[in-house]
Amino acid sequence: MAPERLTRSSTMPSTYRFPEGFLWGAATSAYQIEGSPLADGAGPSIWQRFAHTPGMMHDGDTGDVACDHYNRWREDVALMAELGLQAYRFSISWSRILPEGRGRVNRAGLAFYERLVDALLERQIMPVATLYHWDLPAALDDMGGWLNRDVAHWFADYATVMYEALGDRVPMWATLNEPWVVAHAGYVEGTLAPGHRNLYEAPIVAHNLLRAHGAGVQAYRASAKQQIGLVVNLEPKYSASQDERDLRATQHADAYMNRQYLDPAMLGAYPGEMREIFGAAWPDFPAEDLALIRQPLDWVGVNYYTRSVNAYSAKRWPVQARPVRQKHATYTETNWEVYPRGLSETLEWVTKRYGRVPLYVTENGAAFFDPPTPIDGAVDDPNRVEYYRRHIRAVHDALRAGADMRGYFAWSLLDNLEWSLGFAKRFGIVHVDFESLGRTVKRSGRFYAEIIRTNGGAL
Protein backbone atom coordinates (compact mmCIF):
# COMPACT_ATOMS: atom_id res chain seq x y z
CA MET A 1 0.00 0.00 0.00
CA ALA A 2 1.12 3.57 -0.47
CA PRO A 3 3.62 4.71 2.16
CA GLU A 4 1.25 7.23 3.75
CA ARG A 5 0.77 6.49 7.45
CA LEU A 6 -0.97 8.10 10.39
CA THR A 7 0.97 8.74 13.58
CA ARG A 8 0.39 5.96 16.09
CA SER A 9 0.20 6.69 19.80
CA SER A 10 3.02 5.12 21.79
CA THR A 11 0.80 4.50 24.82
CA MET A 12 -0.37 0.89 24.89
CA PRO A 13 -3.96 0.29 26.02
CA SER A 14 -4.64 -1.62 29.20
CA THR A 15 -7.76 -3.06 27.59
CA TYR A 16 -9.02 -3.85 24.11
CA ARG A 17 -12.62 -2.99 24.86
CA PHE A 18 -14.33 -1.28 21.93
CA PRO A 19 -16.64 1.74 22.05
CA GLU A 20 -20.28 1.22 22.93
CA GLY A 21 -22.25 0.47 19.79
CA PHE A 22 -19.37 -1.20 17.96
CA LEU A 23 -20.99 -3.83 15.74
CA TRP A 24 -19.89 -7.47 15.89
CA GLY A 25 -20.96 -9.81 13.12
CA ALA A 26 -20.09 -12.59 10.70
CA ALA A 27 -20.37 -12.80 6.93
CA THR A 28 -21.26 -15.26 4.16
CA SER A 29 -22.19 -15.14 0.48
CA ALA A 30 -25.09 -16.68 -1.39
CA TYR A 31 -23.43 -19.11 -3.79
CA GLN A 32 -20.98 -20.30 -1.14
CA ILE A 33 -23.62 -21.45 1.35
CA GLU A 34 -27.16 -21.50 -0.01
CA GLY A 35 -27.30 -24.50 -2.35
CA SER A 36 -30.56 -25.14 -4.24
CA PRO A 37 -29.45 -22.72 -6.97
CA LEU A 38 -32.43 -23.37 -9.25
CA ALA A 39 -35.06 -23.90 -6.53
CA ASP A 40 -38.44 -22.20 -6.62
CA GLY A 41 -38.00 -20.64 -10.04
CA ALA A 42 -34.49 -19.19 -9.68
CA GLY A 43 -32.38 -18.72 -12.79
CA PRO A 44 -28.78 -19.90 -13.31
CA SER A 45 -25.81 -17.69 -12.51
CA ILE A 46 -22.33 -17.51 -14.01
CA TRP A 47 -21.09 -19.48 -11.01
CA GLN A 48 -23.33 -22.43 -11.76
CA ARG A 49 -21.98 -22.48 -15.30
CA PHE A 50 -18.39 -22.11 -14.13
CA ALA A 51 -18.68 -24.75 -11.41
CA HIS A 52 -20.14 -27.26 -13.86
CA THR A 53 -17.41 -26.65 -16.44
CA PRO A 54 -14.92 -29.55 -16.27
CA GLY A 55 -11.53 -28.63 -14.86
CA MET A 56 -12.54 -25.31 -13.27
CA MET A 57 -13.26 -26.49 -9.71
CA HIS A 58 -11.20 -28.45 -7.19
CA ASP A 59 -12.43 -32.05 -7.17
CA GLY A 60 -15.35 -31.03 -9.38
CA ASP A 61 -17.10 -29.41 -6.40
CA THR A 62 -20.15 -27.23 -7.02
CA GLY A 63 -22.52 -25.05 -5.03
CA ASP A 64 -25.52 -27.22 -5.85
CA VAL A 65 -25.83 -28.18 -2.18
CA ALA A 66 -23.03 -26.17 -0.50
CA CYS A 67 -24.13 -25.77 3.15
CA ASP A 68 -27.83 -26.15 2.24
CA HIS A 69 -28.51 -22.82 3.92
CA TYR A 70 -31.52 -22.34 1.63
CA ASN A 71 -33.25 -25.10 3.60
CA ARG A 72 -31.38 -24.85 6.91
CA TRP A 73 -31.53 -21.09 7.42
CA ARG A 74 -33.55 -21.43 10.65
CA GLU A 75 -30.81 -23.59 12.16
CA ASP A 76 -28.17 -21.13 11.01
CA VAL A 77 -29.98 -18.12 12.47
CA ALA A 78 -30.25 -20.01 15.76
CA LEU A 79 -26.47 -20.56 15.64
CA MET A 80 -25.94 -16.84 15.10
CA ALA A 81 -28.04 -16.10 18.14
CA GLU A 82 -26.12 -18.70 20.16
CA LEU A 83 -22.87 -16.96 19.25
CA GLY A 84 -24.30 -13.59 20.23
CA LEU A 85 -23.85 -12.07 16.77
CA GLN A 86 -25.16 -8.53 16.59
CA ALA A 87 -25.15 -8.45 12.78
CA TYR A 88 -25.13 -10.86 9.86
CA ARG A 89 -23.72 -9.86 6.49
CA PHE A 90 -25.13 -11.98 3.67
CA SER A 91 -25.43 -11.58 -0.08
CA ILE A 92 -28.46 -11.86 -2.32
CA SER A 93 -28.49 -14.09 -5.37
CA TRP A 94 -29.46 -11.76 -8.23
CA SER A 95 -30.73 -14.65 -10.38
CA ARG A 96 -32.86 -15.96 -7.50
CA ILE A 97 -34.73 -12.64 -7.58
CA LEU A 98 -34.67 -11.98 -11.35
CA PRO A 99 -34.23 -15.31 -13.18
CA GLU A 100 -33.57 -13.52 -16.48
CA GLY A 101 -31.47 -10.88 -14.75
CA ARG A 102 -34.07 -8.17 -15.38
CA GLY A 103 -37.79 -7.78 -15.79
CA ARG A 104 -39.85 -10.53 -14.13
CA VAL A 105 -39.48 -10.82 -10.35
CA ASN A 106 -39.43 -14.32 -8.87
CA ARG A 107 -41.59 -13.84 -5.78
CA ALA A 108 -40.62 -17.21 -4.30
CA GLY A 109 -36.94 -16.28 -4.39
CA LEU A 110 -37.66 -12.90 -2.85
CA ALA A 111 -39.67 -14.58 -0.10
CA PHE A 112 -36.60 -16.57 0.98
CA TYR A 113 -34.72 -13.39 1.86
CA GLU A 114 -37.79 -11.87 3.48
CA ARG A 115 -38.07 -14.89 5.78
CA LEU A 116 -34.36 -14.73 6.57
CA VAL A 117 -34.44 -11.02 7.39
CA ASP A 118 -37.52 -11.39 9.57
CA ALA A 119 -35.90 -14.25 11.49
CA LEU A 120 -32.75 -12.18 12.05
CA LEU A 121 -34.75 -9.25 13.36
CA GLU A 122 -36.69 -11.53 15.69
CA ARG A 123 -33.32 -12.52 17.20
CA GLN A 124 -32.20 -8.87 17.31
CA ILE A 125 -29.49 -9.54 14.72
CA MET A 126 -28.98 -6.68 12.27
CA PRO A 127 -29.30 -7.78 8.61
CA VAL A 128 -26.52 -6.35 6.39
CA ALA A 129 -27.24 -7.12 2.74
CA THR A 130 -24.74 -7.24 -0.13
CA LEU A 131 -26.37 -6.91 -3.52
CA TYR A 132 -23.57 -8.42 -5.60
CA HIS A 133 -21.11 -11.07 -4.45
CA TRP A 134 -19.89 -12.37 -7.83
CA ASP A 135 -22.93 -14.35 -9.04
CA LEU A 136 -24.17 -12.48 -12.14
CA PRO A 137 -27.28 -13.99 -13.75
CA ALA A 138 -26.24 -16.18 -16.68
CA ALA A 139 -28.88 -14.53 -18.86
CA LEU A 140 -27.08 -11.19 -18.47
CA ASP A 141 -23.71 -12.76 -19.16
CA ASP A 142 -25.18 -13.95 -22.45
CA MET A 143 -25.74 -10.26 -23.24
CA GLY A 144 -22.16 -9.30 -22.42
CA GLY A 145 -22.46 -9.14 -18.65
CA TRP A 146 -20.00 -6.72 -17.08
CA LEU A 147 -18.68 -5.82 -20.55
CA ASN A 148 -22.05 -4.31 -21.51
CA ARG A 149 -22.55 -0.68 -20.43
CA ASP A 150 -26.24 -1.43 -19.87
CA VAL A 151 -25.25 -3.59 -16.88
CA ALA A 152 -25.22 -0.47 -14.66
CA HIS A 153 -28.92 0.06 -15.38
CA TRP A 154 -29.71 -3.64 -14.97
CA PHE A 155 -28.02 -3.54 -11.58
CA ALA A 156 -29.89 -0.41 -10.48
CA ASP A 157 -33.21 -2.00 -11.45
CA TYR A 158 -32.37 -5.15 -9.49
CA ALA A 159 -31.22 -3.06 -6.53
CA THR A 160 -34.48 -1.13 -6.58
CA VAL A 161 -36.46 -4.38 -6.37
CA MET A 162 -34.51 -5.30 -3.25
CA TYR A 163 -34.72 -1.84 -1.66
CA GLU A 164 -38.49 -1.79 -2.13
CA ALA A 165 -38.84 -5.29 -0.68
CA LEU A 166 -36.44 -5.04 2.26
CA GLY A 167 -35.46 -1.40 2.66
CA ASP A 168 -37.74 -0.99 5.66
CA ARG A 169 -36.06 -3.90 7.47
CA VAL A 170 -32.42 -3.89 6.31
CA PRO A 171 -30.58 -0.85 7.71
CA MET A 172 -27.22 -1.46 5.98
CA TRP A 173 -26.60 -2.27 2.30
CA ALA A 174 -23.49 -2.84 0.23
CA THR A 175 -23.60 -2.50 -3.54
CA LEU A 176 -20.63 -4.66 -4.53
CA ASN A 177 -18.28 -7.05 -2.80
CA GLU A 178 -14.64 -6.94 -3.92
CA PRO A 179 -14.95 -5.62 -7.49
CA TRP A 180 -11.18 -6.12 -7.93
CA VAL A 181 -11.63 -9.89 -7.58
CA VAL A 182 -14.48 -9.87 -10.11
CA ALA A 183 -12.34 -8.09 -12.71
CA HIS A 184 -8.95 -9.66 -12.01
CA ALA A 185 -9.81 -13.28 -11.25
CA GLY A 186 -12.82 -13.35 -13.58
CA TYR A 187 -11.40 -11.53 -16.61
CA VAL A 188 -7.58 -11.48 -16.31
CA GLU A 189 -6.59 -14.75 -14.63
CA GLY A 190 -9.73 -16.67 -15.54
CA THR A 191 -9.68 -18.59 -12.24
CA LEU A 192 -13.15 -17.43 -11.21
CA ALA A 193 -16.40 -17.00 -13.11
CA PRO A 194 -16.88 -16.23 -15.93
CA GLY A 195 -13.35 -17.51 -16.60
CA HIS A 196 -12.09 -15.01 -19.20
CA ARG A 197 -8.42 -14.16 -19.83
CA ASN A 198 -8.34 -10.87 -21.71
CA LEU A 199 -6.37 -7.83 -20.60
CA TYR A 200 -8.49 -5.54 -22.77
CA GLU A 201 -11.68 -6.64 -21.02
CA ALA A 202 -10.47 -5.99 -17.46
CA PRO A 203 -10.61 -2.15 -17.42
CA ILE A 204 -14.05 -2.18 -19.04
CA VAL A 205 -15.36 -4.66 -16.48
CA ALA A 206 -13.87 -2.70 -13.58
CA HIS A 207 -15.37 0.54 -14.88
CA ASN A 208 -18.82 -0.96 -15.42
CA LEU A 209 -18.74 -2.47 -11.93
CA LEU A 210 -18.11 0.99 -10.53
CA ARG A 211 -20.81 2.51 -12.75
CA ALA A 212 -23.21 -0.11 -11.41
CA HIS A 213 -22.16 0.78 -7.88
CA GLY A 214 -22.88 4.46 -8.52
CA ALA A 215 -26.25 3.69 -10.10
CA GLY A 216 -27.10 1.40 -7.19
CA VAL A 217 -26.34 4.15 -4.68
CA GLN A 218 -28.46 6.63 -6.64
CA ALA A 219 -31.35 4.17 -6.65
CA TYR A 220 -30.99 3.72 -2.90
CA ARG A 221 -31.15 7.45 -2.24
CA ALA A 222 -34.35 7.57 -4.30
CA SER A 223 -36.16 4.81 -2.42
CA ALA A 224 -34.54 4.13 0.96
CA LYS A 225 -33.16 6.30 3.73
CA GLN A 226 -30.72 4.34 5.88
CA GLN A 227 -27.11 3.41 5.01
CA ILE A 228 -25.34 2.19 1.90
CA GLY A 229 -21.68 1.50 1.23
CA LEU A 230 -19.10 -0.26 -0.92
CA VAL A 231 -16.97 -3.27 0.08
CA VAL A 232 -13.43 -3.58 -1.27
CA ASN A 233 -10.61 -6.01 -0.59
CA LEU A 234 -7.39 -4.22 0.33
CA GLU A 235 -3.92 -5.65 0.64
CA PRO A 236 -0.95 -3.52 1.67
CA LYS A 237 1.92 -3.76 -0.80
CA TYR A 238 5.53 -3.72 0.34
CA SER A 239 8.58 -3.70 -1.92
CA ALA A 240 10.92 -6.67 -1.56
CA SER A 241 13.90 -4.32 -1.99
CA GLN A 242 14.87 -0.75 -2.81
CA ASP A 243 15.61 -1.73 -6.37
CA GLU A 244 13.86 0.71 -8.71
CA ARG A 245 12.06 -2.07 -10.58
CA ASP A 246 10.73 -3.62 -7.36
CA LEU A 247 9.55 -0.23 -6.11
CA ARG A 248 7.79 0.52 -9.39
CA ALA A 249 6.14 -2.89 -9.49
CA THR A 250 4.92 -2.41 -5.92
CA GLN A 251 3.48 1.01 -6.75
CA HIS A 252 1.64 -0.49 -9.73
CA ALA A 253 0.34 -3.37 -7.61
CA ASP A 254 -0.99 -0.88 -5.05
CA ALA A 255 -2.71 1.24 -7.71
CA TYR A 256 -4.20 -1.82 -9.41
CA MET A 257 -5.63 -3.47 -6.32
CA ASN A 258 -6.08 -0.80 -3.65
CA ARG A 259 -6.68 2.48 -5.46
CA GLN A 260 -8.35 1.48 -8.75
CA TYR A 261 -11.73 1.19 -7.04
CA LEU A 262 -11.63 3.50 -4.03
CA ASP A 263 -10.11 6.47 -5.87
CA PRO A 264 -12.98 6.79 -8.40
CA ALA A 265 -15.62 6.05 -5.75
CA MET A 266 -14.19 8.48 -3.19
CA LEU A 267 -12.15 11.00 -5.20
CA GLY A 268 -13.71 10.90 -8.65
CA ALA A 269 -10.62 9.89 -10.64
CA TYR A 270 -8.57 6.80 -11.46
CA PRO A 271 -4.97 6.53 -10.25
CA GLY A 272 -2.49 7.89 -12.77
CA GLU A 273 -0.70 4.56 -12.89
CA MET A 274 -3.62 2.78 -14.55
CA ARG A 275 -2.63 3.86 -18.06
CA GLU A 276 0.93 2.75 -17.41
CA ILE A 277 -0.29 -0.63 -16.18
CA PHE A 278 -2.68 -1.38 -19.04
CA GLY A 279 -1.07 0.55 -21.87
CA ALA A 280 -3.21 0.43 -24.99
CA ALA A 281 -5.82 -1.62 -23.12
CA TRP A 282 -6.73 1.37 -20.92
CA PRO A 283 -9.63 3.35 -22.47
CA ASP A 284 -10.59 6.97 -21.97
CA PHE A 285 -13.67 7.19 -19.75
CA PRO A 286 -16.12 10.12 -19.98
CA ALA A 287 -16.37 12.61 -17.14
CA GLU A 288 -20.06 11.86 -16.65
CA ASP A 289 -19.16 8.24 -15.82
CA LEU A 290 -16.82 9.36 -13.06
CA ALA A 291 -19.51 11.69 -11.73
CA LEU A 292 -21.90 8.72 -11.56
CA ILE A 293 -19.32 6.58 -9.78
CA ARG A 294 -18.52 9.19 -7.13
CA GLN A 295 -21.61 8.99 -4.97
CA PRO A 296 -21.67 9.99 -1.27
CA LEU A 297 -21.25 6.86 0.85
CA ASP A 298 -22.41 6.23 4.39
CA TRP A 299 -19.65 3.71 5.04
CA VAL A 300 -16.86 1.71 3.45
CA GLY A 301 -16.23 -1.98 4.06
CA VAL A 302 -12.68 -3.33 4.08
CA ASN A 303 -12.00 -7.03 3.51
CA TYR A 304 -8.53 -7.90 4.76
CA TYR A 305 -6.69 -11.22 4.74
CA THR A 306 -2.98 -10.65 4.13
CA ARG A 307 -0.25 -8.40 2.77
CA SER A 308 1.96 -8.79 -0.30
CA VAL A 309 5.72 -8.28 -0.53
CA ASN A 310 6.49 -7.64 -4.19
CA ALA A 311 9.38 -8.04 -6.58
CA TYR A 312 9.51 -7.20 -10.27
CA SER A 313 8.58 -9.97 -12.69
CA ALA A 314 8.04 -9.36 -16.40
CA LYS A 315 5.88 -12.51 -16.58
CA ARG A 316 3.28 -11.38 -14.03
CA TRP A 317 0.78 -9.26 -15.90
CA PRO A 318 -0.59 -6.68 -15.77
CA VAL A 319 1.45 -5.11 -12.94
CA GLN A 320 4.69 -7.10 -13.37
CA ALA A 321 4.88 -7.84 -9.66
CA ARG A 322 5.26 -11.25 -8.04
CA PRO A 323 4.75 -12.00 -4.35
CA VAL A 324 7.83 -12.98 -2.37
CA ARG A 325 7.33 -15.57 0.35
CA GLN A 326 8.61 -14.40 3.72
CA LYS A 327 10.97 -16.50 5.81
CA HIS A 328 9.83 -17.47 9.31
CA ALA A 329 6.30 -16.23 8.65
CA THR A 330 3.09 -18.16 9.28
CA TYR A 331 0.98 -18.92 6.21
CA THR A 332 -2.61 -20.10 6.01
CA GLU A 333 -3.94 -23.02 3.98
CA THR A 334 -4.56 -20.58 1.11
CA ASN A 335 -0.89 -19.57 1.20
CA TRP A 336 -1.60 -16.14 2.67
CA GLU A 337 0.86 -14.69 5.17
CA VAL A 338 -0.59 -13.99 8.61
CA TYR A 339 0.22 -10.31 9.07
CA PRO A 340 -2.12 -8.51 11.52
CA ARG A 341 -0.18 -5.24 11.42
CA GLY A 342 -1.22 -4.89 7.79
CA LEU A 343 -4.85 -4.59 8.86
CA SER A 344 -4.26 -1.62 11.15
CA GLU A 345 -2.02 0.03 8.55
CA THR A 346 -4.67 -0.49 5.87
CA LEU A 347 -7.45 1.04 7.95
CA GLU A 348 -5.24 3.98 8.86
CA TRP A 349 -4.26 4.44 5.21
CA VAL A 350 -7.91 4.55 4.10
CA THR A 351 -8.58 7.20 6.74
CA LYS A 352 -5.67 9.35 5.69
CA ARG A 353 -6.28 9.09 1.95
CA TYR A 354 -10.07 9.36 1.86
CA GLY A 355 -10.98 11.15 5.07
CA ARG A 356 -12.57 9.92 8.27
CA VAL A 357 -15.25 7.81 6.60
CA PRO A 358 -17.06 5.26 8.81
CA LEU A 359 -15.26 1.95 8.35
CA TYR A 360 -16.24 -1.66 8.89
CA VAL A 361 -13.99 -4.68 8.58
CA THR A 362 -16.50 -6.60 6.50
CA GLU A 363 -14.39 -9.76 6.09
CA ASN A 364 -11.42 -11.09 8.00
CA GLY A 365 -10.52 -14.70 8.68
CA ALA A 366 -8.26 -17.60 7.79
CA ALA A 367 -8.28 -21.10 6.36
CA PHE A 368 -6.43 -23.55 8.59
CA PHE A 369 -6.70 -27.31 8.61
CA ASP A 370 -9.80 -28.64 10.36
CA PRO A 371 -10.84 -32.29 10.38
CA PRO A 372 -13.67 -33.27 8.00
CA THR A 373 -15.71 -34.39 11.01
CA PRO A 374 -15.57 -33.16 14.62
CA ILE A 375 -13.48 -35.14 17.09
CA ASP A 376 -15.50 -36.14 20.15
CA GLY A 377 -18.09 -33.58 19.13
CA ALA A 378 -15.64 -30.66 19.09
CA VAL A 379 -13.39 -28.77 16.66
CA ASP A 380 -10.27 -27.31 18.22
CA ASP A 381 -8.68 -24.67 15.94
CA PRO A 382 -6.06 -22.78 17.99
CA ASN A 383 -4.42 -21.18 14.95
CA ARG A 384 -7.68 -19.52 13.96
CA VAL A 385 -8.28 -18.39 17.55
CA GLU A 386 -4.90 -16.67 17.57
CA TYR A 387 -5.55 -15.20 14.11
CA TYR A 388 -8.74 -13.55 15.34
CA ARG A 389 -7.13 -12.36 18.56
CA ARG A 390 -4.29 -10.60 16.75
CA HIS A 391 -6.38 -9.14 13.94
CA ILE A 392 -9.12 -7.76 16.17
CA ARG A 393 -6.42 -6.18 18.29
CA ALA A 394 -5.14 -4.60 15.06
CA VAL A 395 -8.61 -3.11 14.48
CA HIS A 396 -8.41 -1.61 17.96
CA ASP A 397 -4.97 -0.18 17.10
CA ALA A 398 -6.47 1.53 14.04
CA LEU A 399 -9.32 2.90 16.17
CA ARG A 400 -6.82 4.42 18.60
CA ALA A 401 -4.86 5.88 15.68
CA GLY A 402 -7.91 7.80 14.47
CA ALA A 403 -9.81 5.50 12.11
CA ASP A 404 -13.60 5.71 12.48
CA MET A 405 -14.11 2.02 13.14
CA ARG A 406 -17.77 1.00 13.42
CA GLY A 407 -17.74 -2.81 13.29
CA TYR A 408 -16.09 -6.12 12.51
CA PHE A 409 -17.39 -9.16 10.61
CA ALA A 410 -15.65 -12.52 10.84
CA TRP A 411 -15.25 -14.50 7.63
CA SER A 412 -16.93 -16.79 7.67
CA LEU A 413 -19.86 -17.92 9.74
CA LEU A 414 -19.76 -21.36 8.11
CA ASP A 415 -17.24 -23.53 6.37
CA ASN A 416 -18.39 -23.26 2.77
CA LEU A 417 -17.60 -23.59 -0.91
CA GLU A 418 -14.40 -21.60 -1.23
CA TRP A 419 -15.12 -20.73 -4.87
CA SER A 420 -12.83 -22.64 -7.29
CA LEU A 421 -11.01 -24.19 -4.32
CA GLY A 422 -14.20 -26.11 -3.59
CA PHE A 423 -14.65 -27.53 -0.11
CA ALA A 424 -10.92 -28.05 0.47
CA LYS A 425 -10.36 -24.84 2.47
CA ARG A 426 -12.28 -24.09 5.66
CA PHE A 427 -12.75 -20.51 6.90
CA GLY A 428 -15.74 -20.96 9.20
CA ILE A 429 -16.10 -20.31 12.89
CA VAL A 430 -18.77 -23.01 12.60
CA HIS A 431 -17.64 -26.37 11.21
CA VAL A 432 -19.76 -27.97 8.50
CA ASP A 433 -19.58 -31.71 7.90
CA PHE A 434 -20.10 -31.74 4.13
CA GLU A 435 -21.39 -35.32 4.23
CA SER A 436 -24.05 -34.91 6.92
CA LEU A 437 -24.25 -31.08 6.74
CA GLY A 438 -24.17 -31.02 10.53
CA ARG A 439 -22.95 -27.82 12.18
CA THR A 440 -20.50 -27.63 15.11
CA VAL A 441 -19.29 -24.39 16.64
CA LYS A 442 -15.48 -24.40 16.62
CA ARG A 443 -13.27 -23.22 19.45
CA SER A 444 -12.72 -20.05 17.38
CA GLY A 445 -16.48 -19.51 17.33
CA ARG A 446 -16.65 -19.78 21.13
CA PHE A 447 -13.71 -17.39 21.40
CA TYR A 448 -15.39 -14.90 19.08
CA ALA A 449 -18.62 -15.19 21.05
CA GLU A 450 -16.70 -14.20 24.18
CA ILE A 451 -15.17 -11.23 22.37
CA ILE A 452 -18.67 -10.11 21.44
CA ARG A 453 -20.00 -10.66 24.96
CA THR A 454 -17.18 -8.57 26.47
CA ASN A 455 -17.03 -6.05 23.59
CA GLY A 456 -13.37 -6.91 23.09
CA GLY A 457 -12.46 -7.44 26.72
CA ALA A 458 -11.64 -11.11 26.09
CA LEU A 459 -8.76 -10.14 23.80
Image: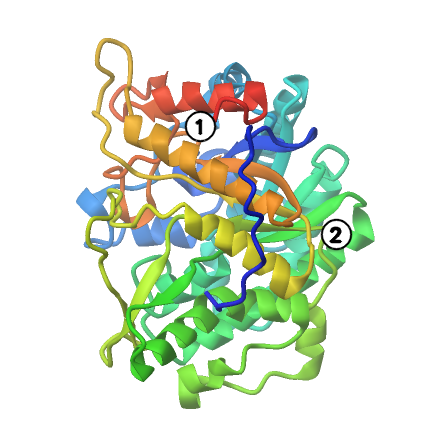
Instruction: Residue at the far front: name it.
Output: 11
Q: Nearer the viewer, residue 349 or 155?
A: 349
Distance between the Cα atoms at labels 2 and 1? 28 Å
Q: Secondary structure at mark 1?
A: helix
Under mark 1, the amino acid is His
Q: Quadrant of residue 264?
A: bottom right
- Mark 2 — residue? 220
Depth order, front residue of 15/213: 15
CB contact under 8 Å: marks 2 and 1? no
Please give the name of the residue rendered at 48% of the width and 68% of the height, measured from the top-left corner. Answer: 3
- Eyeballing the image, is 152 above or below 408? below
State whether residue 52 is above or below residue 457.
below
417 relative position to 119: left or right:
left
> How far across and down, in percent of the image, does residue 327 sit?
19, 54
The disc label shown at residue 69, or none = 1
The amino acid pointed to by label 2 is: Tyr
Instruction: Please state the total of marks drawn on the protein image.
Output: 2
Residue 262 visible: yes
Residue 337 x, y percent position in the rendering: 30, 50
User: Tag 2, which secondary structure?
Assistant: helix
Quarter occupied by residue 321: bottom left
List the single residue furthest toward the top: 376
Residue 64 in the image: x percent, y percent?
34, 37
